[in-house]
Amino acid sequence: MAKSSKGSLSILTNGIMKENPVLKLVLGTCPSLAITTMAKNGIGMGIAATFVLLGSNIVISLIRKMVPDKVRIPVFITVIAGFTTIVDMLLHAFLPDIYKELGIYIPLIVVNCIIFARAEMFASKNSVGASILDALGMGAGFTIALLIMGSIREILGSGTWMGIPVTKNLFDPAIIMILPPGGFLAFGFVVAAIQKFSVLNVKNKEIASECGMNCPGCAAAGNGGDE
Amino acid sequence: MKEIILIAIAAVFVENFVLSKFLGICPFLGVSKKTSTAVGMGGAIIFVITISSVVTWSINEYLLKPYDLTYLQTIVFILVIAALVQLVETVMKKFMPPLYRALGIYLPLITTNCAVLGSALLIVEREYTFLNAVVFGVSSAVGFTLALVLFSGVRERIETNDIPTAFKGLPITLIAAALVSVAFFGFQGLFGI
């Protein structure tokens, strides 16, 4: 395992840069658009999802040899739903403000494609250690993407960042950015910027079609076991 | 009666699942390339959300509430929906082969569609009565389909346009979605909802 340190580092950074779940793989778009009206919410959602991802990756990696292939999907979903419930209760008890802001998007972490995709593609095939790193990397990538989206929308839409006024004398905030259309707009421009700065990446052109394949792909994986 | 109509109109237009609640974005971006597939997906969604509204409402009311198990909502709902989709698929295959052929490939994709779980959770959160729950479920699914079909029309137009390289693919789709969303935003304030 001489190259393990390098290997684990690449697992960790893979989720942040190369395969950023939101910005590159276009997974988990629902929460990325819905709750990013404020940078703070982005971090809250990111951490909640990371916790679920970490928990489910660890458990699924531990039980991967015990679970028969045929029933793995329901098992994975149950594990993920269990951790989502834990997060739901923890936030309700300790961070009621965030809990209120995120609303039904907390239980909806269950159907967040990122978590299921990592369980299916990584945790069910790799050791616990690697799965933990993968969960942390993916979770960080998700949180960073949400933070970027949340910051853009909060600064442009309400003129604040993390609740601190920043554009007081510069311009009047454009309310549309914190309304639903602003979510699509901000996401569109962020992805466009990423495509612009990685033109050399040939795969870029396929991003749109990849999403079409990916989201249903992970959903299809969700039923593959029953066939 | 008035309440029901209000719930229906609000669910279809004002709080459209895709364009203002961001539920079901994946299929919205994924299968909106052609109008025909959009209609197929929409049909499957209406079918599943309607059934899941009835089933999850009943389970919540008669099973979870009496036994004080509402904290299990997330787990129970997602398993029920997954099982339901499977059941619907099997039943359709056996008894309604033409419908199955039309909707078949879209059905498995629905389990992980947040619109289905989202509608079940919203129904519980808002404490709708049975009738209101069903109306809400059906109309939000209709709203989803409407957005999907409308948007597929927009996308078919974009296909042939000349778009800056950086915006090709997903970004322009999202920006088009933003414009459609602005259009739907016009419904806000309708009937003072």
Image (tube, helix red, strand yellow):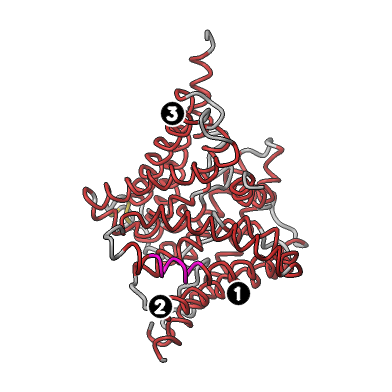
| x and y, in percent, of residue A67 in the image | 52, 34
Amino acid carrying label 3: it is Ile
Q: Is residue B167 above or below residue A195?
A: below
Dot 2: chain letter: B
Q: Is residue B56 magenta?
A: yes
Amino acid carrying label 2: it is Phe
User: Residue furthest toward the bottom?
Assistant: B1
Distance (Cα) linking label 1 and label 3: 41 Å
* Disc 3 target residue: A132
For the point 32% across and 46% down, which residue is it? A87
| x and y, in percent, of residue A40 in the image | 32, 50
- Tell me whether marks 1 and 2 sit on the same chain: yes
Report if the CB atoms under discs 3 and 2 are less than 8 Å apart: no
Q: Main secondary structure of the magenta part?
A: helix
Dot 1: chain letter: B
Q: Is residue A118 above or below residue B83?
A: above
- Give the camera-side residue of A182 and A57: A57
Amino acid carrying label 1: it is Leu
Label 2 Cα neighbours within 10 Å, binned few <14 / some 14-19 / many ≥20: some
Q: Nearer the viewer, mark 3 or mark 2?
A: 2
| x and y, in percent, of residue A46 in the image | 39, 44
- Give the camera-side residue of B157 and A155: B157
* Disc 2 target residue: B130
Give the residues in magenta. B52-59
